[in-house]
Image: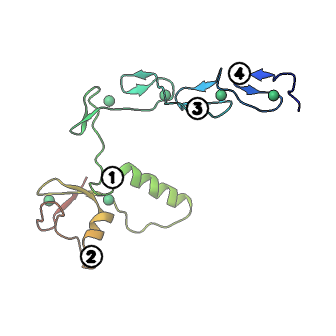
Amino acid sequence: MACLLGHKWDGCKCSKCGKTRDKLHDWDLCKGKCKRCGKIQPEQHDWQGCKCSKCGKENHHWVEGKCSLCNKEKEKSCSVCGITNTDFDNHYKAQAARGVVIISRDKLVKCDHCNYVICTVCLNKAGGDGWGYPNCPSCKSEPSYNAV
Ligand SMILES: [Zn+2]
Ligand SMILES: [Zn+2]
Ligand SMILES: [Zn+2]
Ligand SMILES: [Zn+2]
Ligand SMILES: [Zn+2]
Ligand SMILES: [Zn+2]
């Protein structure tokens, strides 16, 4: 064994045999992970308001669609699957990059009567096999939807 007479510790890891110890980790605090041995701990961000000054991660405090700290408005998302218009855009961009020709673009819509937000994929599923959109899944009114 190479390290019979003692390991050559480089922080938490022996640079000769690769053995690790639970000491002197080289933490990437934002990822909560030791860069040397991969040990996990809870993420520790450096929050400046709603944003980590180190990695840029955002952590808003949503209260009824608005952040109570910075007043940012939360992006609307589908009440069923949670997708946002940004998610759709990224999805189409990725498809276009693979050469897929996109004919109909699904997006978020809002019921005119009760402001229920749903994506057209989920709306089509709710409608079964019939033509056109079904009645609003929330308030059951005749279909009248607007783009969000
Ligand atoms: Zn060793
Ligand atoms: Zn480590
Ligand atoms: Zn961070
Ligand atoms: Zn915020
Ligand atoms: Zn959906
Ligand atoms: Zn409705």
Image quadrant assignment for residue 108: bottom left
Helix, strand or loop at mark 1: loop
- First reached walking from the N terminus: tag 4 or tag 2: 4
Residue under the point 12% across and 68% down: 142
Task: Name the residue that disc number 2 marks.
Answer: 128
Task: Name the residue that disc number 1 marks.
Answer: 82
Q: Check disc 1 and give the amino acid type.
A: Gly
Mark 3 Cα-neighbour bin, 10 Å: few <14, some 14–19, many ≥20? some
Residue under the point 25% across and 28% down: 68
Percent x, y for residue 104? 37, 67
Percent x, y for residue 18? 78, 33
Q: In the picture provided, is 142 more to the left or to the right than 50? A: left
Residue under the point 33% across and 32% down: 60
Percent x, y for residue 40? 56, 33
The yes-or-no answer for disc 2 within 8 Å of ligand 5 is: no
Q: In the picture provided, is 148 more to the left or to the right than 3? A: left
Helix, strand or loop at mark 4: loop
Task: Name the residue that disc number 3 marks.
Answer: 33
Helix, strand or loop at mark 2: loop
Is 60 rendered above or below residue 77?
Answer: above
| Pick the front one: 4 or 43 | 4
- First reached walking from the N terminus: tag 4 or tag 3: 4
The label shown at residue 35 is none
